[in-house]
Amino acid sequence: MHFHILTIFPEYFESPLRIGLLKKALEKGLIKISLYNLRDFTEDKHKVVDDEPYGGGEGMVFKPEPLYRAITTIKERHPDTYVIYLSPQGRLFNQEVAEELSRKKNLLLICGRYEGIDERIRKYFVEEEISIGDYVVFGGEVASLVIIEAVSRLIPGVVGKRDSVDKESFTSGLLKYPCYTRPQEFMGYKVPEVLFSGDHKKIEDYRRKESLRLTLERRPELLNKVFLTSEDLETLRELLQRQRLYLFLVHYPVYNKRGEVITSAIANIDLHDLSRLGRTYGVKKVYIIQPFEDQRALAEDLINYWLYGRGKTYNPLRSEALKLLRVVSTLDEALSEVEKEEGERPFLVGTDASPKRPFITPEELRDLLWERPVSLVLGTAWGLEESFLKDCDYFLEPIWGRLDFYNHLSVRSAASIFLDRILKPYLLFKKTFKPKEE
């Protein structure tokens, strides 16, 4: 593998390339790194590489002529060179990209500075743009070092033990398991006994489960790219039981369209759709909060029909979903039941179509699910009454329209969108599983 680095600061690389595994890889000839000073490809006596942007604005832009000369010169010497511009607008760098690049023979990494490079070079003379993350640094030099290290590790012989590379985070598709060393006890904190048991099978099983746990908690989206065994699936199911999400559908206090506080009527379709939604996404229970006794009685009659009457045999799937429903008179009653069930008070997360207060994102709510039970509160009619919302611990980000801020949705539609945004990374059950290795 031959890395070519085009930069205005070649001295930036002096120290990193002289230490650790990179130094050893260079000495062994496993990789080669060539540094090119962009100023050497200028033709004026002042070696100017940048100029002011057309149209005005702050900053400077790398001129096209020096970049073109540098790219063509390197490609003349190494025709198979793959040209990469390191840019915040590029494809996000990850292990998959590193593995892809490791199969190239020559990589040219263009280190931008200031406001970037002339668009004509980017558009017509660069094969790919790559970004190392959604943040801004002074220039592409640090990004090029990230790519060099990540790609070099994949070159045979650079890392002493191939097993070390294969078991790193992201190489296997999962985050790496926790590591411990001596002493067995430090400040009262002990190493898990399985690690010094001498039973290699148990140790491997433990590490696999820990990798699954960390990935599920911190980067669940990675699981969509991993082949899982049936044992892995069972481990994930057990871990997901720790997420305790409840739905509260509130009929009082809510607003009507004139802004008056009312009690809304229970809708048959809400009971059916929210229970099926809850069953699909693994919600623990759906609470219907309705203060009127006659309304609660009607709801109970409907639920009993599906749980114990003809509905149970007519549609067993519907019956299974309606088991999640619990009809109570007040929010306090629902909260008390959840607290009794879980042994701790749940986070109360309100929803409101109008952004009157700071809100959390679905991703942030997802993190809360690993801390405590969460009750997601949905209002009927024209939304939850204001004084009720003040008792909530958090507020979930409203559902915005794609073209404008129209978001007049039914409670069933809103609940479906909310749950999908919160729980989608955990929907693992339709994956292709590989058989257990003997």
Image (cartoon, rainbow, N blue to C red):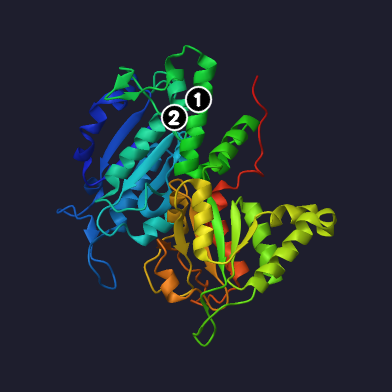
Q: Quadrant of residue 296?
A: bottom right
- The kind of residue on which mark 2 rests is Tyr
Three-letter amino acid code at disc 1? Tyr
* Residue 177 marker: 2
Select label 1 or label 2 by which is in front: 1
Extreme top residue here?
Answer: 198
| Vertical comparison of 324 with 77: above or below | below
The percent coordinates of residue 394 (x first, y second) are 41, 62
Q: Are marks 1 and 2 in contact (CB under 8 Å)?
A: yes
Pick whichever, 286 or 409, lies toward us.
Answer: 286
Residue drawn at x 69%, y 68% as measured from the top left: 297
Categorize mark 2 by other alpha carbons within 10 Å: few (<14), some (14-19), many (20+).
some
Measured along the vertical axis of the image, is residue 161 above or below residue 142?
Answer: above
Residue 365: % across, % down: 45, 55
Count of numbered circles on the image? 2
Name the quadrant containing residue 226: top right
| Rendered-image quadrant of the N terminus | top left
Residue at x-position 51% and y-position 68%? 399
**Res. 174 visible in picture:** no
Query: In the image, 391: left or right of 259?
Result: left
Find residue 274 and name its label: none
Mark 1 surroundings: few (<14), some (14-19) or many (≥20) residues within 10 A: some
Q: Point out the tag, 1 or 2, that comes first from the N-terminus.
A: 2
Across and down, in percent, residue 45 comes to 15, 53
Q: Could you tell me which secondary element the residue under label 2 belongs to?
A: loop
Quick check: 398 above or below 222? below
Q: Is residue 95 above or below residue 357?
A: above
Residue linked to disc 1: 206
Residue lying at the far bottom in this picture: please name it.
258
Q: Nearer the viewer, residue 278 or 81?
A: 278
User: Which is more toward the observer, 236 or 55?
Assistant: 236
